Image (cartoon, rainbow, N blue to C red):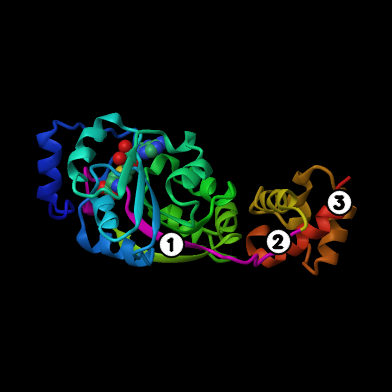
């Protein structure tokens, strides 16, 4: 079977099976060859790769990954897509489809049992309604993932990729960049999908660093400090850090001084390194 990524090939498959798209499951199928190639390049897909895909749809991206990678495990929540996938992926015996909700999957166990213990890459055109929970699941749950290359809503990609001092820079930028180097891989305007969504998309590459770039004494306090720093975007750090709840005004002044950060600055101007240094000073004052 040839590629599924043309408008007519996708329509044929959908019509043949009488498939009805579900808006609530974020079903917008990609119909652009160039974007598919960019995704594979952005993921540096190669022969020995172990891949997890979330939401294969009718298998458009899945097929192209299956032709190259060692193994692809695709998790699809919609059981109506399973017979379609059985047909479209029929000739690829290194591809396995699992009919489950990704948020309920024990990914570590899956990697152990089906993907040689990793390392794995997560490559997907994600359903928009749960993009962030899926990405954070892979980053926070100690899964041996080296690269996450995903299609997300453009605005989400902009936030993940943002630098300090810009309007898009916030807790999501730091949550992602704490672990990864980020890269915008491709743009995918809405006309590249059927049905057409109301938003444009971007493929973002999150390349997990093998080494720790920002050493912190406590990740919990680091992320709490970041959250507090962005809790009131228009206020100075002297004010916003009071939402931590356990530091007096005087102590906030002290930690900012120790971290060499002007108390009049706003959280959105701090680099991740500055947040790391600040959180270590905060951590030393945890009651
Ligand atoms: N990969 C296909 C493509 O690029 O054409 C389809 C992508 S579509 C944006 C998102 C897919 O994720 C749909 O197939 C949808 O059914 C599936 N999906 C939605 N929520 C899911 C969940 N919680 N777990 C697994 N798959 C899910």
User: Whereabouts is ligand 1, in terms of quadrant?
Assistant: top left
Q: Along the polypeptide, which appears first: circle 3 or circle 2?
A: 3
Label 2 to label 1: alpha-carbon separation: 23 Å
Question: Mark 2 = which residue?
Answer: 275
Point out which mark residue 286 bears: none
Within 10 angstroms of label 3, few (less than 14), some, or many (20 or more) residues? few
Picture coordinates of residue 33 (x, y %)? 20, 60
Magenta span: 190-216
Whole-percent x, y for residue 268 in the image: 63, 60
**Earlier sequence position, callout 3 versus callout 1:** 1
Which class describes the residues within 10 Å of circle 2: few (<14), some (14-19), or many (20+)?
many
Question: Cα distance, mark 3 to mark 2?
Answer: 18 Å
Which of the two marks, 2 or 1, is nearer to us in this view? 1
* Mark found first going from the N terminus, 2 or 1: 1
Q: Position of residue 161 (x, y in %)?
A: 49, 62
Nearer-the-camera pick, 84 or 29: 84
Q: Is residue 134 visible?
A: no
Q: In the figure, 22 relative to 250: above or below?
A: above
Q: Which residue is mark 3?
A: 249
Tell which tag, 3 or 2, sits nearer the viewer. Answer: 2
| Residue 234 position (above or below residue 162) | above
Q: CA distance from mark 3 to mark 1?
A: 40 Å
Q: Using the rendered image of the protein, determine whether residue 186 is visible from the camera's viewpoint.
A: yes
Confirm or reject: label 1 Cβ below 8 Å from ligand 1: no
Mark in the foreground, 3 or 1: 1
- Using the image, determine if residue 88 lies above or below residue 64: above
> For mark 1, what is the residue?
205
């Amino acid at each position: 079977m040839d590629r599924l990524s043309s408008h007519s090939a996708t329509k044929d498959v959908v019509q043949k099976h009488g498939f009805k798209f579900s808006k609530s499951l974020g079903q917008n199928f990609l119909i652009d060859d160039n974007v598919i190639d960019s995704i594979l390049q952005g993921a540096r897909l190669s022969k020995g790769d172990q891949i997890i895909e979330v939401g294969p749809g009718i298998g458009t991206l899945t097929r192209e990954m299956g032709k190259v990678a060692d193994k692809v495990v695709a998790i699809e929540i919609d059981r109506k897509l399973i017979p379609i996938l059985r047909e479209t992926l029929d000739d690829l015996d290194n591809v396995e489809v699992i009919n489950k909700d990704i948020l309920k999957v024990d990914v570590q166990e899956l990697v152990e049992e089906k993907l040689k213990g990793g390392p794995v890459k997560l490559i997907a055109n994600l359903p928009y309604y749960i993009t962030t929970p899926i990405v954070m699941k892979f980053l926070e749950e100690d899964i041996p993932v080296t690269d996450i290359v995903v299609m997300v809503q453009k605005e989400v990609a902009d936030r993940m990729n943002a630098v300090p001092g810009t309007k898009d820079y916030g807790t999501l930028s730091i949550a992602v960049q704490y672990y990864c180097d980020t890269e915008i891989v491709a743009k995918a305007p809405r006309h590249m999908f059927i049905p057409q969504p109301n938003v444009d998309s971007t493929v973002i590459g999150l390349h997990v660093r093998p080494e720790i770039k920002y050493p912190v004494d406590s990740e919990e306090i680091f992320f709490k400090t970041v959250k507090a720093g962005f809790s009131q975007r228009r206020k100075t750090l002297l004010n916003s850090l009071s939402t931590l709840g356990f530091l007096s005004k005087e102590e906030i002044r002290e930690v900012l001084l120790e971290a060499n950060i002007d108390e009049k600055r706003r959280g959105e101007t701090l680099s991740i390194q500055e947040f790391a240094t600040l959180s270590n000073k905060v951590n030393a004052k945890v009651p």
